[in-house]
Image (cartoon, helix red, strand yellow):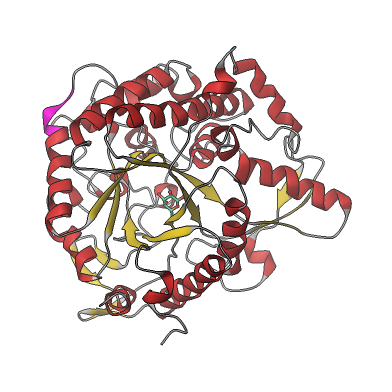
Amino acid sequence: MTAFSKNDFGPGFSWGVATSAYQIEGAVNEDGRSPSIWDTFSHTPGKIKTGENGDVACDFYHRYHDDIAFIRQMNMKVNRFSLAWPRILPGGTGPVNPKGLDFYHRVIDRTLELGLEPWITLYHWDLPQVLEDQGGWTNRDVVGWFSEYVGVCARAFGDKVKHWMVLNEPTIFTALGYMQGLHAPGRKGFANFLPAVHHAAMAQAEGGRILRASVKDAQIGTTFSASYIQPAGPTWLSRAAAASYDAVVNRLFIEPALGLGYPWKAAPFLLALKRYIRPGDMEKLAFDFDFIGLQTYFRQMVRFDPLALGTFAREIPHAERGGELTEMGWEVWPENIYLLLKQFGAYKGVKRIIITENGAAFPDTPQGERVSDPQRLKYIQDHLAQVLRARQEGVRVEGYFYWSLLDNFEWAEGYRPRFGLVYVDYPTQKRILKDSGRWFGEFLAN
Ligand code: FCB
């Protein structure tokens, strides 16, 4: 029993789950799909901790019909999923692949048939490799390539789909993919990171404008990764380090979208972005999003470090801070989501917030037809309590999507961390609704 009920969140609150194409679909060589940067990266030895790749993943490409039914079974309303750009435009730009469009029509139709709402993410990290070969997000032309892709998707699905998210976590795909080399395409350094940031911010707003022009009655958003940033100590240096870290982790993409520009006051190294900014760009970074998607898993604690170039902040590893850790090594600290809702809710330009991802991985083991996952259930309930707390204090948070529907390919970590409400036995592709998923079914029942 929880201290709250679904009614406390109000009748308009959206409940759902989130997934992304590369993490679940598999079928990487089927029906005309071309390789994405994640195919290349996961097939490069040493990049994925377990040596695995997304070739088969959850085989959602063939199993979507039954998989989507789990969302209904849990009495949720929203199926948030992403489109794979290389299925739709195998050349990155140019000819459209009808079989790619067909697959997403089937996913959308199945979603609607079950009385659920499809919420589409246009870019969840699987850039066509042919475009990376031309510089990927570091090449300014990516704004045009992306616009073409968005236009194709909006025209193809706009009659059926009203909820759209332009990018998934631009801070993460630029920082991990183009600065630290930990995610695809595995590039490093400021010379890759900074242009990738500016071009992703341009694409974010441009994508919004294209959707607005081509989809009638669209609700347009984009998603941001977020972590509450806490200074490790009370000193001025510690607080300044936290502020510059916060500028990169939480403010880098939302502020240009809101017309506030890049947060270079708090993180002066971002002034180097100017090298990639052309006249007229700053105005184009803004777009009037109908909602923002907030995605959060943990807080971050930082201390001043003169050797940490850029932010001068160094994160204190979660394991050194004590407390419960998930299978990702991420600290469980539910108040994080409340503090972030307050922080993002304080922006004047933010109309509505949806928690488009939140969740946890724990080592689940099936016992017969059951998977008991009490740690995940507690994680969910404690986070929902904090979401409700923010809502009751006036933050306009209007949805919660659990990450993820299925256990899936967790990027550089491989299949080991299991985030799903549905357990996937990879060798047989058998599914079992975990106890946390059963709980959602009861909690959301009428
Ligand atoms: C987010 C990603 C999502 C998943 C979760 C655990 O950063 O958007 O694809 O990997 O983390």
- In the displayed structure, would residue 219 be above or below residue 233? above
Is 4 positioned to the left or the right of 234 in the image?
A: left
Instruction: Estimate the x, y position of residue 209 in percent, counting from the top left.
Output: 40, 28
Question: At 40% across and 47% down in the image, what residue appears?
Answer: 411
- Confirm whether residue 221 shows in the render: yes
Residue 54 position in % (x across, y down): 29, 45
From the viewer's perspective, is 10 left or right of 426? right
Q: Give the range drawn in magenta.
A: 96-100
Quarter of the image containing the C terminus?
bottom left
Would you say the magenta stretch is mainly helix, strand or loop?
helix
Question: Residue 444, located in which quarter of the rendered image?
Answer: bottom left
Say which of 58 and 223 sits in front.
223
**Is 260 on the left-hand or right-hand side of 125?**
right
Query: Residue 99 is drawn in which quadrant?
Result: top left
- Asked if residue 98 is among those painted magenta in the image, a careful observer would answer yes
**Extreme residue in the top direction:** 279
73 over 278 or under it: above or below: below
Q: In this view, does 165 lie above or below 353?
A: above
Q: In which quarter of the image is the N terminus?
A: bottom left
Question: Residue at position x 20%, y 70% from top?
Answer: 73
Residue 438 in the image: x percent, y percent?
27, 77
Q: Does the magenta stretch include residue 216?
A: no
- How many marks are shown on the rendered structure? 0
Q: Residue 74 at x, y = what percent? A: 25, 70
